[in-house]
Amino acid sequence: MPYVSIRVAGKLTRTQKQNIARGVTEVIAREANKPESSILIFIDEEERENIASGGKLLDE
């Protein structure tokens, strides 16, 4: 059973999450030859103040 973890800075709409889940599921099912029903996708939305790049918080 494939598990996919996706972490994003900020918030996604429900539609965006649905589209991401659909697209990722299709690719993994096709490329890994796995049934779509066996693929689990976790989408974690992180506050931009909790992520840093280049020594600066993303919300700066």
Image (tube, grey):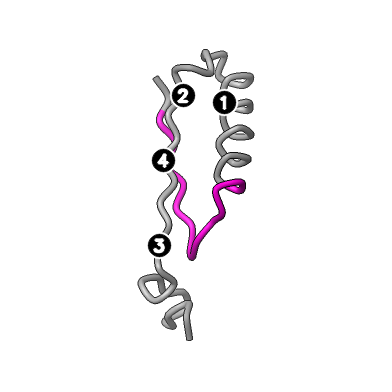
Q: Is residue 23 magenta?
A: no
C-alpha span from label 3 to label 2? 22 Å
Q: Which residues are magenta?
A: 3-16
Identify the residue position indicated by label 2 in the image: 39
Q: Name the quadrant containing residue 45.
A: bottom left
Return the disc, 4 or 1, that comes first in the chain's sequence.
Answer: 1
Identify the residue position indicated by label 4 in the image: 42
Residue furthest toward the front? 14
Q: Nearer the viewer, mark 4 or mark 1?
A: 4
Q: Residues within 10 Å of mark 4 (few under 14, many from 20)?
A: few
Identify the residue position indicated by label 3 in the image: 46
Q: Position of residue 19 (x, y in %)?
A: 63, 40
Residue furthest toward the bottom? 60
| Amino acid on which disc 3 is placed | Glu
| Amino acid on which disc 4 is placed | Phe
Q: Residue at x 42, y 81 (%)?
A: 55
Return the disc, 3 or 1, that comes first in the chain's sequence.
Answer: 1
| Amino acid on which disc 2 is placed | Ile
Report if the CB atoms under discs 4 and 1 are less than 8 Å apart.
no
